[in-house]
């Protein structure tokens, strides 16, 4: 066999004995494999050979994680990601054939460094026909090969198994598209590289690797859309929870995230599924993503939103910026609320007020509601009124009433909790008279409610009809001569203008007493009637 020569074309700096975890600059990212990767995964180095007779001449091994002997023997040579010559063959490998593990940089990136644990060597190869080495774009990396200087057949190796002095080598200054660790037959034409049977051997083993890649190109953002990025769907204002839809793309390591910030503070982030055991760790496109944000996290007023996409190397896209005005608050109470009767003795009132000043969103309207001043009883449904008033308010009937007024703004915000209140009194009507019917006497101030009493055995049943809503206090007394021998009272709500109150009487009261029934509507109007052990009806 003849000797072969190797020309080294790439000048590199090799720094030994460094940790596989390196600090790397912005615009770069790192991909790890085998012992240097989580769960000892390899998703970036691919084994290949140009020998058509493979596996006759070359053997592939993928033993990650490395858990072999650590003695430098055959087991170590086949540990990790490794390539060896095949054994027990009658013929050797042809010149120019090769096999090994290759890392290829994604488009738009370049390899700038490598930290790896390796064991490269051959033995009984007196003519140096075998060339095990690390190569960058096909050229041997200086110091990362094993070539004997003499034809003495002794063993030559670079590195060692883990724990045997083969500390990680750190290589910097690279500018390559491809790295490969393997063996090449460099025998002259007409010769061959002897494969091992009992003596010859060649190997290139890598137990762990971290590749550093340069990715100078930032990702790109699509044009954002959605309510959050619009002009404000609430009268030109933004409120509640809104969303923005956007996508990002990247040539190189892929898109890692899209971040939404408000006034420079991140508020929502889409994080892409990235795996830094792959040469391209992140997806080249995020697809359409929707970022949802509750604007209640911002104060009312003007804020600046930004969208930024970041790729695997930390490059950021050109910022997309948008200014919004947030209004989540209802207007404060109206100022100086008052109400006056439209005419003497009327139950209709004119409510007036002034709108508060200094509002972010203009006040566009008002609501009013009437409730019993006592706090008990049903309120009317809210009704609308002009922003600055006045409002014409008719109360349900005689008595004391509370009128509440609150405001709404251009963003559609309104809250009854921000109401102003004023009280009015509606007088009773002037009509009145005495009731009719056998055994009854009655007095009333106005025919507002109607009372029917029925005595059935010992049950006193009182029916009251009147306005649609309200609370009526129904009571009775039972007298014998000048003495009161029984009494009772209940407060019952009118439902659709009707109610029923039932009292259980004692035998003596039911049989002999003079029973007087009283009903009071919202504590303002009283009616009474008298019952002697029979049914009767009175309207009051």
Image (cartoon, rainbow, N blue to C red):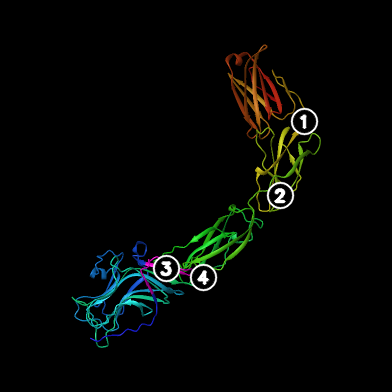
Q: Residue at x 31, y 77 (%)?
A: 145
Q: Mark 1 points at which residue?
A: 429
Numbered badge on residue 30 = 3
425 or 148, which is in the foreground? 148
For the residues bearing labels 2 and 1, Cβ distance under 8 angstroms: no
Q: Do the residues labelled 3 and 1 touch (CB within 8 Å)?
A: no
Q: What element carries label 1?
A: loop
- Mark 3 secondary-structure assignment: strand
422 to 252, vertically: above or below: above
Question: Element at badge 2?
Answer: strand
Viewed as shown, does residue 497 lie left or right of 208?
right
Q: Which of marks 2 and 4 is nearer the N terminus?
A: 4
Give the number of the mark in front: 2 or 3.
3
Would you name the residue on which mark 2 appears? 365
Callout 4: helix, strand or loop? loop
Which of label 3 and label 1 is nearer to you?
3
Can you identify the residue that label 4 sits on? Answer: 218
Q: Nearer the viewer, mark 4 or mark 3?
A: 3
* Residue appearing at x 40%, y 68% in the figure: 31
Instruction: Give the residues in magenta.
Output: 14-32
Marks 4 and 1, the one that precedes in the sequence: 4
Q: How far apart are the alpha carbons under marks 2 and 1? A: 34 Å
Q: Where is residue 367 in the image (x, y as percent from the top left)?
A: 69, 45
- Residue 58 visible in rendering: no
Q: In this view, does 534 lie to the left or right of 252?
A: right
């Amino acid at each position: 066999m003849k000797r072969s020569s190797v020309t080294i074309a790439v000048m590199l700096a090799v720094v030994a004995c460094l940790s596989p975890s390196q600090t790397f600059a912005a615009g770069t990212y790192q991909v790890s494999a085998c012992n240097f990767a989580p769960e000892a995964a390899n998703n970036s180095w691919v084994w290949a050979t140009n020998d058509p007779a493979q596996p006759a001449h070359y053997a592939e091994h993928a033993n990650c994680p490395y858990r072999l002997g650590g003695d430098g023997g055959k087991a170590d040579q086949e540990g990790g990601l490794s390539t060896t010559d095949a054994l027990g063959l009658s013929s050797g490998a042809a010149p120019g054939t090769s096999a090994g593990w290759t890392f290829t940089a994604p488009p738009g990136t370049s390899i700038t460094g490598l930290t790896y644990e390796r064991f490269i060597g051959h033995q009984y190869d007196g003519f140096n026909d075998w060339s095990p080495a690390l190569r960058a774009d096909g050229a041997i990396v200086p110091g990362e090969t094993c070539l004997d200087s003499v034809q003495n057949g002794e063993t030559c190796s670079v590195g060692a198994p883990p724990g045997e002095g083969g500390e990680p080598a750190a290589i910097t200054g690279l500018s390559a598209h491809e790295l490969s660790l393997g063996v090449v037959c460099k025998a002259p034409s007409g010769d061959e590289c002897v494969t091992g049977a009992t003596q010859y051997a060649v190997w290139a083993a890598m137990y762990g690797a971290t590749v550093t890649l340069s990715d100078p190109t930032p990702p790109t953002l699509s044009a954002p859309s959605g309510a959050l990025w619009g002009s404000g769907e609430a009268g030109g204002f933004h409120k509640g929870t809104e969303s923005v839809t956007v996508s990002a793309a990247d040539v190189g390591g892929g898109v890692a995230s899209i971040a939404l910030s408000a006034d420079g503070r991140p508020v929502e982030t889409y994080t892409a599924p990235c795996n830094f055991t792959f040469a391209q760790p992140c997806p080249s496109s995020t697809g359409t993503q929707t970022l949802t944000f509750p604007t209640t996290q911002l104060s009312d007023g003007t804020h600046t939103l930004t969208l930024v996409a970041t790729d695997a190397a930390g490059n950021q896209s050109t910022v997309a910026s948008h200014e919004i005005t947030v209004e989540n608050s209802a207007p404060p109470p109206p100022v100086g609320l008052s109400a006056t009767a439209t005419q003497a003795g009327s139950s209709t009132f004119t409510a007036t007020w002034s709108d508060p000043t200094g509002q972010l969103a203009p006040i566009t309207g008002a609501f009013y509601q009437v409730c019993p001043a006592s706090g008990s009883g049903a309120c009317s449904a809210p009704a609308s009124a002009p922003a600055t008033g006045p409002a014409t308010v008719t109360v349900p009937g005689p008595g004391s009433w509370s009128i509440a007024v609150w405001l709404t703004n251009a963003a559609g915000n309104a809250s009854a909790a921000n109401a102003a209140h004023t009280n009015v009194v509606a007088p009773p009507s002037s009509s009145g008279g005495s009731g009719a019917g056998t055994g009854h006497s009655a007095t009333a101030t106005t025919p507002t409610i109607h009372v029917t009493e029925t005595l059935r055995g010992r049950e006193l049943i009182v029916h009251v009809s009147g306005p649609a809503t309200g609370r009526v206090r129904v009571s009775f007394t039972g007298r014998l001569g000048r003495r009161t021998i029984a009494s009772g009272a209940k407060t019952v709500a009118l439902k659709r203008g009707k109610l029923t109150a039932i009292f259980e009487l004692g035998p003596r009261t039911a049989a002999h007493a003079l029973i007087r029934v009283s009903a009071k509507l919202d504590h303002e109007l009283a009616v009474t009637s008298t019952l002697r052990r029979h049914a009767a009806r009175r309207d009051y």
